[in-house]
Image (cartoon, helix red, strand yellow):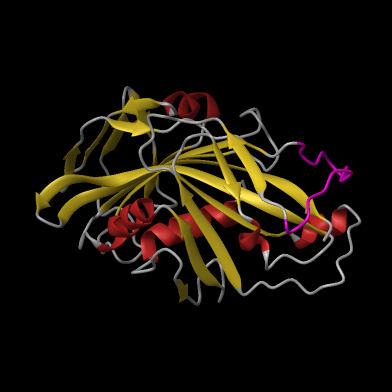
Amino acid sequence: MEKYFILIIVSLLLTISGCRNGSDSMVGDKPWGNKKLVLHGSPNLIDEYTDFLTGINYSKISLNISSTTPVQDLDNSRSDYSIICRDFNNPYNSDDGFMNNGSLMINDVLIPFKNQTNSYELNTPSVVRQFFGNKVKPIFNNPIDTLLTDSLYIPKEIFLSVDPKILNTDTSYSYNTSDNISLKWNADFNNAKGVVISIEYDDAMTKLTGSSSTQTPSNDELDLIFTEDIGNFIIPSSYLSNLPTNCIAKINIVRCNFGFIGSISPNFYKGRYLLQSSGGAFIKFTN
């Protein structure tokens, strides 16, 4: 899945406020530009994602562990992995970095400090990959902040399948925008935070495959679907109304675990964590 969608999800987790099922919210200067965000699916999951952002007033330490699988891939042979942890002097300023050096251990792995970014970072696939589908225990120490956490579950890596899928420029199989689209992925029944799915027109892939839409795509809206992590979901045709005829669309999926650690007092925590994996697929629409 592309970094664009990860930015959407991360920014959504960091900025969304009060957007509920079936409603929309105009946002500017975000990775999705001036598109309306429209949220569909499980009200409980939407509330849980929203409350993660709006129910807590303060957190300094931010821990993000991620796996990004390229669109169309069904294994992790080309996946990108990263761990990044920052300690914000001002938690509302994302350009701020660690106030002091210290140490970050995840299980028995020491995460190195990067002076260039003022953060702890690690992107070695063979090391980071082992954490997915398992519990980890981060321990952070520096002269000002000490954070001892309970074990955190990092959900399994996610691989999305649309059958049959497009391979390279082979678009012999297609859907209609009046079809319901059946999605499958490897379920993680230990993941209580569900998955987030988006579907949108992909101009680059449409041109690459020789498709030529006669319509101008409607790009003023981005639909996000929140559903349980049970390994399948049917996208109803009503969610496809913004897609033009004869185009390639991209479906993205993110599986997350998130929360707060190091309680100081009610609604005040030392840190937050976002543990995620992502994947995607292309499909063709003819009409």
Total numbered badges shown on the rendered structure: 0
Q: Quick check: 128 above or below 170?
A: above
| Residue 216, percent from left and from top | 78, 74
User: Split into 4 quadrants, where in the image is the C terminus?
Assistant: bottom right
| Residue at left offset 77%, top offset 36% | 164
Residue 238 in magenta? no
Residue 164 located left or right of residue 38 = right
Residue 170 in magenta? yes
Write down the region rendered in magenta. 164-178
| Residue at left offset 50%, top offset 77% | 28
Residue 50 position by quadrant: bottom left
| Residue 56, percent from left and from top | 21, 59
| Residue 97, percent from left and from top | 34, 56
Q: Nearer the viewer, residue 144 or 280?
A: 280
Q: Which residue is farthest left?
A: 265
Residue 183 located left or right of residue 64 = right
| Residue at left offset 48%, top offset 35% | 230
